[in-house]
Each structure stands twice: as structure tokens, then as C-alpha cells.
């Protein structure tokens, strides 16, 4: 599944980035900001009107990312209870 | 000695566009045998805070990734030797392509340096460690600073600094730049690293353009067993505040409520303070300046009192308001809420071809449009940058705030003033949004939106005071420079030819000449003349009004309330908000866009929009029978 499909509050890990050639720059930025394979990832909340997602990466990095860009991040959902 | 010198726009422009022009910096360093130390780090890791601490400079700091977009230099004694310290914009990696990252990259590529200081946010060491590894791969001599030790401790991040230093083979120090912890070691490490470094790095490593990527395996092998990251973050201040401030329903209303409260505070404190300063300057005029000048001929008295003193005294009345405004601005910028406002507004901004960061730049423009225009360098798409730059001049800057406070206080009953002022801020957003909506087809972009949301932070008292004082100094420089010049010019055109008065003077003639254009807006020839001086800077509008009427601050306000109706006053405010920005802003527009056509287009559009908006407002109000 992609990050865009992940429910708020559920814990997941990053599998890989699915980018085409034009998006190489974005890929680098996402890696630098901490979206790296095996990193723990969580959607904290989603902005209304189709706005960005509030994401926590690992434990100490939080970012806002548009749903468009979140579709490029493949994640694996963990059961969090 | 501890003077920071901010490179002016021309300099920077030369530097970013012309590859061979390195002579000035080179020779300056070599002739003085100064060693050069360069600060490098990801955005929002506290490089400028560290730079300020080390050099005593007052670089702008804020909790926003992209606060510093040009480089700053200062000299400081380290280990008894004078050393040049350079603060660079943040970079995510050496392959970044936004304009602020290019400034940093080109600096390292083009200028000789002796040492790199890599600053990391210690609590995010798990990802930021990639940067020192890249620098190591480039073979640059470096000292690693793990900043924000206080936050890392609160999060429960544990770092074995000595072991990390060994694995990196770089001196590594854990500090808190903000609270000044760990500086003794920083000085020692820099000084000893500089001592060991006999050769200045003249040529940058050739691989800078095609830097090796750091793999997760490399990061793992450096960090494993040395750094312990917390598994989960419990509830802390940031998560608690975010739950309220980023609420899907209440987030935006809370934003506007907060904004309203801030501006009512400015209104309710700034206005009485302005009255007090007005009383003080009026007293100085009658009991000091007039007696001293009484032996001089009338024309000289008239020039000095009506021309210079009245203008400057009126503008000075705004000093308390400006200080208060920038203290609140400093708290806002440092809080981390700017990033949150980008998150809240991105959905709307995205629909009009902008993104959340454009909105943040519009808010920064409330202080001054110039840094906001430069702040767009964090955007990589040129189309997005231009579209954002087109909207920033509509941002109600602190200079225009003075004009509006002055006019609103004169033409509106005092109690509603704060609401009227707030309505102008809303209009400022509406104008920006409408502009982007109109032109989004011209400046199409598909820039991705990924933005860090740093934890909430509070500025120290020292940071707030430095900021407030810096703005006062800035204001006084402007007051003694072109505001005085503007007042003299205003006196000249309203007093020449010598025997003429009122509308027969040059100024009166100009005002009357423009009457066919300005009277449908309810703007009389005197106010028109003030707007013409406002082309240079908006502070001059208020100063020149005092000069044009030949009255002191308090009397001008009374005169305006007698001769200008509230509809006319508000129409004047609309026009003043939307028409051409000040000259410095125009120069910045040109420098940042590097396009005459774009700059002229922006000016023409602003002027047209101002006229149309004022016309619509004033004629509608007249239609409903208001005056």
C-alpha cells in the first residue's frame, strides 16, 4: 500500500519509493528528509479539503507532505494496538 | 570587530550568476591571512543561532527551514587568531537544486576555505548524519556540532559523542546553540582543527557536482551502538498544541482568531504609544526647537520645522508600534507555527497554483516584503517562485501598517479601529489569492510539497531584544536617510514657487493634474501627492502628509479627520495597500526574478489592481449613500 492510503494513527514501515525519471530530485529530498527503507512511519492527521498529511518519521522527525507525493511512498502496515 | 556584514543583493547576485568573480573575497582573505570557517548543515538546525553566538552578530533566526537564504560573514577571534566565519543557507545534500542550496554549494565550490563546521540537529541524527558522511567523502576537513542537545535529551535520544567522533574521524561536540552550552569545547576543537590544517583548500573537490549518495547501510554502520533513538514519542507540548492548532475543523478559524488578537494588541498598545511620542515631540517643538530657530529668517524656520521636523516627528511616533510588532513577529517566526500555517493553507494554496510555503512568505511579508521575496529561494520551480513573488508585494508590510494606523485613527471612531485594520490584512490575503488565481495558468508548476514541521520553540529574551533593537536601528537608518530626503522633497514641491500657496504650488499642480484619475476613488490632490512620495517608501506617506499640510503629527490627524470621510480614508488605504511597493522591494523583485519584463509587469498589475479595487469600493459605498 502507499502512504496516502495509510490510516491516521496506524504504524507502518517504509518499503521503497516509487518514482519515475523526472522525480529523481524529489526522491533525493525525500531520502534526505528521512523517508528511507525500513524507517518507521505514521500518519498523525490529514488536513481537510484534501490538504497535506502530517507524518511522523522514526520518532523525532515530523513533516507535511501532499497526498500526491505520499502516493510515491510504498509502505508496509504494522499492526498497532 | 564582531561586525557581521550581510552581503547586499548585488553582491549575491554577482556571486550566484558569475562564476569567475571570486577576486574580492579571495584577496580579502589572503591579504589578512584570515582563516575561513564555513557553517554547513540541513535547514533549521540552528546554524545562524550558532553563528550569532560565536560572532556576536545579529543574523535573522527563526524556526523555519529556509530562514537564511544568502550567506553572511563575520570575523571572530578563535584561539587568539582572527578567523572569518561564514553562515550558509541550509542544504539537504550536496545535490540540491533550489536557489538557496545553490548559494551554499557555489560558496563551497568557489571560495577557499580552511574548515567546515557541520551542524546537525542532534535529535534527528538518525537522518542528518548523512551530511557529515558526504563531507567526509569529499575530503573536506570538518568539525561536527550536534546542536539542540536540550531537545535531544527531552526526546530521549542518547549519543555516545566520543565513539561517534572516532567512527567519523572528525571532532564531534554536543551543544545547545540557543542556550549557550558547550561553547568552550567548540572553541577548542575549532582552534585545534585549524592549527592542524596547514593548507587552505583552494579548489573544491571535483566530485561536488556529482556527490556520492550515502546508503542506509553506511548510516547504520556509523550509528549502530552509538546512537539510541527513542522507540515512540509520548505526549509532549508539541503533540498537545498540534492537536488543537492543526485540528481539521478548528485549525483555520484559530489561525484567523490568533491573527486578529495579535493585531488588536498592536492597535491597542501601539496607538496610545504613538500619541505619547506625539505629545513629546510637540513639546520639544514648542519649548526647544522654535525658540532656538526664532532668530532665523522665516523661510528657514519653515523649512526646518514644517519640512524636516514635522515629517520626522510624525514618523518617529511609530517607533513603539514597530518594536512591538517585530517582537511579536520574532515570537511567531521562532515558534514553529509558520510551518503549521503552511500545512493548514496548502489545500487552498494548491488550488491556485501556489503551495503552503507561498502563504508563509506572505506572512513574512507582513514584516517586510524584501526578505519574503528572497525567502522564495527555497522553491525549486521557477514558475512557482515567480507566481509567489507576484503575490508578495500585496503583503501588508510594517511600513504600510504605519500609514493605515495613522489614517484609520483619524477617520474611524477609535473603538472599531482594530477591526478596520484587520480587514486590510484580510484584503491583503484576498488580493494575493486573486492574483495567483488569475495568473496560475501563466506560471504552471508541479513542484512537490514536502515540508518539515519542527517542534514548537520559544525565543529567548535575548533573541527577542536583539530583534527589536535591530529593527529600531534599521528604522532610524531609514528615517535619517531617505525618509528625511522624502520629507525635504515634499516640502520643496509644496512650497515652490516661493509666493504660491495650496494648490498653486508644484505639488498642488501635480495633485490637480491627477484629479481626473484619483477623484473617482475619493482621493484628493493632497493625499495623491502623499501617495506619489510613497513610491519611494511607505513611511514617507505619513511624513509627507505632515509636511504637505504643514502641521505636526497631532494636528495632521485632526485635519485629516475634518477633511477626509471614512469612505475616502478606506479607499486611500486600499490604494496604498495594493499599488506599487517601495523601491527596495522593486529592486529585490528585479534581482530575484532577473527579469525586467516580470518586474514591470508586476508594477503595472499592482497599480491597475489598486485603482480598480479602490474604484469599486468607493463607488459602491457612494451608491449606497454613505459618505
Image (cartoon, helix red, strand yellow):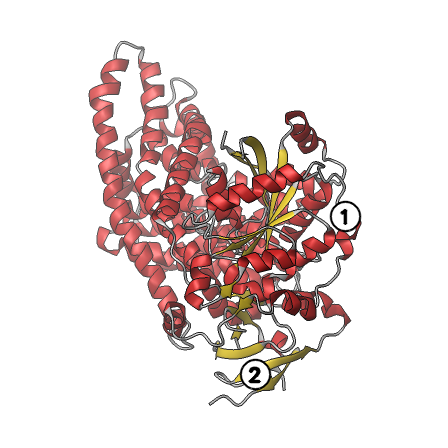
* Left-right relation of B419 to B619: left
- Classify residue B388 by image quadrant: bottom right
Residue B526 point in image, percent of width and height: 38, 36
- Horizontally, residue B286 falls left or right of residue B407, namely left
Q: How many marks?
A: 2
Q: Give the residue at mark 1.
A: B205
Q: Which mark is residue A12?
A: 2
Q: Nearer the viewer, residue B442 or B319?
A: B319
Q: Position of residue B621 (x, y in %)?
A: 36, 58
What is the C-alpha distance between the residues marked 2 and 1? 40 Å
- Residue B116 appears in the rendering: yes
Circle 2/circle 1 CB separation < 8 Å = no
Graded by Cα atoms within 10 Å as few (under 14), some (14 to 19) or many (20 or more), the crowding at tag 1 reads some
Q: What element does badge 1 sit on?
A: loop
Point 75% across, 52% down: residue:
B208
Farthest residue to the right: give it.
B206
The chain letter under disc 2 is A
- Whether residue B64 is situated above or below residue B103 in the rendered picture: below
| Label 2 neighbour load within 10 Å: few <14, some 14-19, many 20+ | many
Percent x, y for residue B350?
A: 56, 69
Query: Residue at the spot x=44%, y=61% of the render?
Result: B151
Q: B436 and B260: which one is in front?
A: B260
Give the residue displayed 62% in from the left and 72% down from the top.
A35
Q: Circle 2 — which element?
A: strand
User: Residue B487 falls in which quadrant of the image?
Assistant: top left
Amino acid at each position: 500500500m502507499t502512504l496516502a492510503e495509510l490510516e491516521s494513527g496506524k504504524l507502518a514501515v517504509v518499503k521503497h519509493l516509487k518514482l519515475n525519471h523526472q522525480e529523481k530530485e524529489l526522491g533525493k529530498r525525500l531520502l534526505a528528509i528521512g523517508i528511507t527503507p525500513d524507517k518507521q512511519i505514521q500518519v498523525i492527521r490529514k488536513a481537510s479539503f484534501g490538504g497535506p498529511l502530517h507524518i511522523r518519521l522514526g520518532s523525532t522527525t515530523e513533516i507535511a507532505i501532499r497526498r500526491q507525493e505520499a502516493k510515491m511512498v510504498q509502505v508496509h502496515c504494522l499492526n498497532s494496538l | 570587530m564582531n561586525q557581521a556584514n550581510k552581503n547586499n543583493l548585488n553582491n549575491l547576485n554577482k556571486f550566484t550568476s558569475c562564476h569567475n568573480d571570486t577576486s574580492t573575497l579571495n584577496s580579502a582573505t589572503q591579504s589578512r591571512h584570515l582563516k575561513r570557517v564555513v557553517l554547513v548543515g540541513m535547514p533549521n538546525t540552528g546554524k545562524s543561532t550558532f553563528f550569532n553566538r560565536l560572532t556576536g552578530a545579529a543574523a535573522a533566526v527563526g524556526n523555519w527551514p529556509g530562514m537564511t537564504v544568502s550567506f553572511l560573514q563575520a570575523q571572530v577571534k578563535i584561539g587568539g587568531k582572527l578567523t572569518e566565519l561564514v553562515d550558509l543557507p541550509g542544504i539537504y545534500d550536496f545535490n540540491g537544486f533550489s536557489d538557496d542550496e545553490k548559494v551554499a554549494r557555489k560558496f563551497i565550490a568557489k571560495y577557499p576555505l580552511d574548515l567546515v563546521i557541520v551542524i546537525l540537529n542532534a535529535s534527528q541524527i538518525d537522518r542528518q548524519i548523512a551530511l557529515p558522511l558526504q563531507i567526509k567523502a569529499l575530503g573536506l576537513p570538518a568539525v561536527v556540532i550536534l546542536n539542540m542537545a536540550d531537545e535531544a535529551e527531552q526526546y530521549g535520544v542518547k549519543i555516545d559523542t566520543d565513539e561517534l567522533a572516532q567512527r567519523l574521524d572528525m571532532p564531534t561536540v554536543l551543544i545547545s546553540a540557543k542556550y549557550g552550552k558547550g561553547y568552550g569545547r567548540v572553541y577548542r576543537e575549532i582552534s585545534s582543527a585549524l592549527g592542524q590544517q596547514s593548507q587552505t583548500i583552494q579548489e573544491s573537490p571535483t566530485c561536488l557536482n556529482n556527490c556520492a549518495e550515502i546508503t542506509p547501510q553506511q548510516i547504520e554502520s556509523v550509528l549502530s551502538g552509538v546512537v539510541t533513538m527513542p522507540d515512540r514519542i509520548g505526549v509532549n507540548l508539541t503533540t498537545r498544541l498540534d492537536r488543537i492548532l492543526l485540528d481539521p475543523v478548528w485549525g483555520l478559524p484559530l489561525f484567523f482568531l490568533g491573527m486578529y488578537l495579535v493585531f488588536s494588541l498592536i492597535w491597542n498598545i501601539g496607538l496610545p504609544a504613538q500619541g505619547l511620542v506625539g505629545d513629546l515631540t510637540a513639546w520639544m517643538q514648542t519649548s526647544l526647537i522654535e525658540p532656538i530657530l526664532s532668530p532665523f529668517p522665516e523661510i528657514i524656520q519653515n523649512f526646518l520645522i514644517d519640512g524636516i521636523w514635522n515629517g520626522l516627528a510624525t514618523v518617529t511616533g511609530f517607533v513603539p508600534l514597530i518594536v512591538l510588532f517585530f517582537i511579536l513577529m520574532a515570537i511567531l517566526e521562532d515558534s514553529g507555527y509558520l510551518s503549521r500555517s503552511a500545512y493548514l493553507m496548502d489545500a487552498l494554496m494548491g488550488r491556485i497554483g501556489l503551495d503552503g510555503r507561498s502563504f508563509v512568505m506572505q506572512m513574512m511579508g507582513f514584516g517586510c516584503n524584501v526578505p519574503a521575496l528572497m525567502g522564495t529561494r527555497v522553491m525549486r520551480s521557477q514558475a512557482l517562485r515567480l507566481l509567489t513573488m507576484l503575490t508578495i508585494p500585496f503583503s501588508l508590510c510594517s511600513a504600510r501598517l504605519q500609514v493605515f494606523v495613522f489614517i484609520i485613527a483619524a477617520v474611524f471612531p477609535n473603538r472599531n479601529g482594530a477591526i478596520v485594520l484587520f480587514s486590510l490584512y484580510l484584503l491583503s490575503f484576498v488580493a494575493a489569492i486573486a492574483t495567483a488565481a488569475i495568473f496560475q495558468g501563466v506560471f504552471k508548476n508541479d513542484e512537490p510539497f514536502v515540508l518539515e514541521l519542527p517542534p514548537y520553540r520559544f525565543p529567548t529574551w535575548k533573541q527577542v531584544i536583539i530583534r527589536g533593537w535591530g529593527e529600531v536601528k534599521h528604522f532610524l537608518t531609514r528615517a535619517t536617510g531617505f525618509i528625511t530626503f522624502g520629507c525635504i522633497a515634499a516640502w520643496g514641491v509644496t512650497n515652490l514657487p516661493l509666493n504660491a500657496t495650496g494648490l498653486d504650488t508644484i505639488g498642488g499642480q501635480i495633485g490637480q493634474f491627477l484629479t481626473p484619475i484619483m477623484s473617482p476613488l475619493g482621493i484628493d490632490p493632497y493625499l495623491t501627492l502623499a501617495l506619489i512620495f510613497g513610491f519611494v517608501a511607505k513611511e514617507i506617506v505619513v511624513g509627507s502628509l505632515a509636511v504637505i499640510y504643514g502641521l505636526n503629527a497631532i494636528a495632521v490627524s485632526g485635519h485629516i479627520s475634518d477633511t477626509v470621510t471614512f469612505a475616502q480614508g478606506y479607499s486611500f488605504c486600499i490604494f496604498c495597500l495594493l499599488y506599487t511597493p517601495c523601491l527596495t522591494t522593486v529592486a529585490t523583485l528585479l534581482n530575484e526574478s532577473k527579469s525586467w519584463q516580470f518586474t514591470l509587469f508586476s508594477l503595472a498589475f499592482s497599480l491597475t489592481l489598486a485603482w480598480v479595487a479602490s474604484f469599486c469600493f468607493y463607488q459602491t459605498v457612494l451608491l449606497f449613500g454613505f459618505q
